[in-house]
Structures are given as structure tokens and as C-alpha cells.
């Protein structure tokens, strides 16, 4: 498996399990309907755990353009490899979103509210305010990247548990900072599924909220680079 395939596969796994738990919670007539925020945050944490463990040995398990750009900005990753990683992450996110739709397509058709359907694919603010919304994504990603950079791998491998700290970090961010914008903290995680929401034949799906789409892209990228610079300054 090449790094490109690893990033594509890992990001697809991330979205299948992450967007999948959202679908299970918010769509009508599912077994997990009305499971709430706790179910969603735990689902995303497990998604991160599985995706990171599956791909870390091959690609470093970036699975997030913010991680890739942050590492490159402080010389910990080759800029020449960045475009390939970003493309793989975007394609993986699109593939994952497609598979979630394939599994839940009858439930999409059985759900009338267009905003609920879109929420399976991508994030949206609880209160629309571009400045506050981008600040929320910036801070959430800043915390994520700074913590990731300080998390050091155990001297002796713990096997699957090597991926646990990052999963717990995502769980913590979701529980503490996820109430404002849905904590994208990953441009590919939001943009790839949003593209699929636009393309897929979902009954009564409404718009894809493209006016907001730049916020979960720009906010995480800026927050990630700032976190990397702070880490380089204080570490």
C-alpha cells in the first residue's frame, strides 16, 4: 500500500464511520435515531481510532489536510508530497460519504428535513456568524494540532492502542468545543462529503450550504499552521 492509497483508504474509513454515526442518529427510522451528541462524538472518536491505526505505518495517518499542511509548514513533512496527500484525503472523504449514502439511502428518502440530510455529510453552525464560526474552527483545530504534536509515540509499541490518544483527543474536542459548528477540524472531512451531497440523487435534499463551506476549510488550515508555529516556538 502506497502513502496515497493509505491516505485515501484511511480518510474513507474515517468518513464511513464518522458520517455513518451521524446518519444513524439523525435520520428517520434508524436503529440509533435520536442518539444525541454523545453518540456522535464517540462515533467520531472510534472512526479516528480505526483510521489512524489502519494507516499510520504507511502514510503517517494524516487523514486531514490541516495535519499535512501544519507538518509541512514547520519542516516535518516534504512540501512536494503535500498535493498528493491532499488529493487522496479529498477523494477518500468523497468515497466514504458515497458509501454512507448507499447504506442509508432509504432513510434519506424517509427523512423530510433537508437540513438534517445535509448534516450527515457536512458541518453547519448552530448560530450563523462567520467571524465566530471561523474562530471556533480555528481554535478547535489549534487545540487538535498542538496536542497531536505533543503526543509522542510509546517507546515500545502498544499495538492498536498506539492510535488511542488521538482518538481520545478528538472525543474531547467534540464534547467540549463541538457545540458551535460541529467541529469539522478537517477540511477534507467537510468538503469531500459536501461535494457528494451536491452530486448525489438525494430526494428533497435542498442546497449544500456552499456559502458556509469556506469556513471549515480556512479555519482549520489557519488554526493548524498557528499551532505548528507555536509548537516549534515552545517545544
Image (cartoon, rainbow, N blue to C red):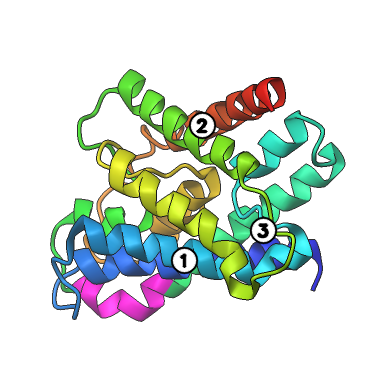
Judge from the rendering whether residue 74 lies leftward or rightward of residue 117; answer left or right.
right
Does the CB distance between marks 1 and 2 fall below 8 Å? no
Q: Is residue 4 or residue 72 the one in the foreground?
A: 72
Residue 170 lies left or right of residue 179; in this view the side is right
In the displayed structure, 54 sits above or below 63; it is: below
| Residue displayed at 38% across by 44% down | 173
- What is the x, y in percent for residue 216? 44, 37
What SS does tag 1 mark?
helix
Q: What is the number of callouts on the image?
A: 3
Whether pointer 1 and pointer 3 mark residues with C-beta atoms closer than 8 Å, the reply is no
The correct choice, above or below, for 30 with respect to 60 in the image is below
First in sequence, mark 3 or 2: give its number.
Answer: 3
Q: Main secondary structure of the magenta part?
A: helix
Identify the residue position indicated by label 1 in the image. Answer: 47
Q: Nearer the viewer, residue 107 or 178?
A: 178
Q: Which residue is mark 2?
A: 142
Choose the circle earlier in sequence order: 1 or 3. Answer: 1
Q: Residue beneath label 3, please?
A: 61
How far separated are the C-alphas under marks 1 and 2? Answer: 20 Å
Q: What span is in magenta?
A: 100-109
Q: Nearer the viewer, residue 85 or 214?
A: 85
Amino acid at each position: 500500500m502506497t502513502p496515497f492509497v493509505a491516505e485515501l483508504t484511511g480518510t474513507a474509513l474515517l468518513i464511513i464511520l464518522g458520517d455513518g454515526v451521524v446518519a444513524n442518529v439523525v435520520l428517520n427510522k434508524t436503529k440509533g435515531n435520536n442518539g444525541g451528541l454523545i453518540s456522535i462524538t464517540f462515533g467520531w472518536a472510534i472512526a479516528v481510532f480505526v483510521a489512524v491505526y489502519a494507516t499510520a505505518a504507511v502514510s503517517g495517518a494524516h487523514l486531514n489536510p490541516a495535519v499535512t499542511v501544519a507538518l509541512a509548514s514547520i519542516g516535518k513533512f516534504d512540501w512536494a508530497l503535500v498535493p498528493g496527500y491532499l488529493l487522496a484525503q479529498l477523494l477518500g472523504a468523497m468515497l466514504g460519504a458515497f458509501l454512507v449514502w448507499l447504506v442509508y439511502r432509504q432513510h434519506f428518502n424517509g427523512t423530510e428535513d433537508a437540513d438534517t440530510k445535509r448534516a450527515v455529510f457536512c458541518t453547519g453552525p448552530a448560530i450563523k456568524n462567520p467571524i465566530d464560526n471561523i474562530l471556533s474552527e480555528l481554535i478547535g483545530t489549534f487545540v487538535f494540532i498542538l496536542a497531536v504534536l505533543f503526543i509522542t509515540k510509546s517507546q515500545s509499541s502498544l499495538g492498536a492502542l498506539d492510535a488511542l490518544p488521538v482518538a481520545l483527543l478528538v472525543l474531547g474536542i467534540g464534547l467540549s468545543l463541538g457545540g458551535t459548528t460541529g467541529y469539522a477540524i478537517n477540511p477534507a472531512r467537510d468538503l469531500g462529503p459536501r461535494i457528494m451531497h451536491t452530486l448525489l440523487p438525494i430526494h428533497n435534499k435542498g442546497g449544500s450550504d456552499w456559502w458556509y463551506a469556506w469556513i471549515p476549510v480556512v479555519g482549520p488550515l489557519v488554526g493548524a499552521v498557528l499551532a505548528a508555529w507555536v509548537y516549534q516556538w515552545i517545544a
